[in-house]
Amino acid sequence: MVAQAGLQQREVLFSGSVQGVGFRYTARSIAHGFDVRGYVKNLSDGRVQVLVEGTPAQIEGFLGALKSQMRHYISGQEQVSRPATGRWAGFEVRF
């Protein structure tokens, strides 16, 4: 994929009590309020992976809203930023 000018990809791995609490569906719902694309997915080790693309401001807004709403369940996070790929058309829950 070709990097998208001005756009960024962010992968965030959330840890804590983040599975079985509606985290993925909350993320999808919040994403609809921002111009972001990507997915959210439960991992086998108990973490939740969020991969999101958009402008840095849209990503920050989305992640800030998600962290605020799910703060009681999140105990840690790891983040990596990369150039956007433009691979996703929307924001989805993956299984």
Image (cartoon, rainbow, N blue to C red):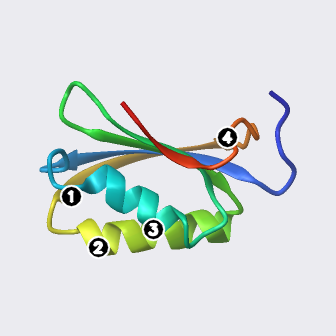
Q: Please give the name of the residue rendered at 53% of the width and 73% of the height, measured from the top-left corner.
A: 61
Asked if residue 74 lies left or right of residue 79, the reply is: left
Residue beneath the point at 44% across and 57% down: 28
- In primary-sequence order, the first of circles 2 and 1 is 2
Mark 1 or mark 4, which is nearer the start of the sequence? 1
Q: Which residue is mark 1?
A: 74
Tell me whether the residue at label 3 lies in contact with that at label 2, contact meaning CB atoms closer than 8 angstroms.
yes
Q: Horizontal and vertical percent for residue 84?
A: 72, 43
**Tag nearer the camera, 2 or 1:** 2
The label on residue 30 is: 3
Q: Which mark is residue 88?
A: 4
How crowded pointer 4 is (Cα within 10 Å; few <14, some 14-19, many 20+) is rated as: some
The residue wearing badge 2 is: 69
- Measure the C-alpha gap from mark 4 to mark 1: 26 Å
Considering only order in the chain, which callout, 2 or 3, is on the residue closer to the N terminus? 3
Nearer the viewer's eye, disc 2 or disc 4? 4
Q: What's the CA distance linking mark 2 and mark 1?
A: 10 Å
Q: What is the three-letter code of the residue carrying label 3? A: Ile
59 versus 2 height, above or below: below
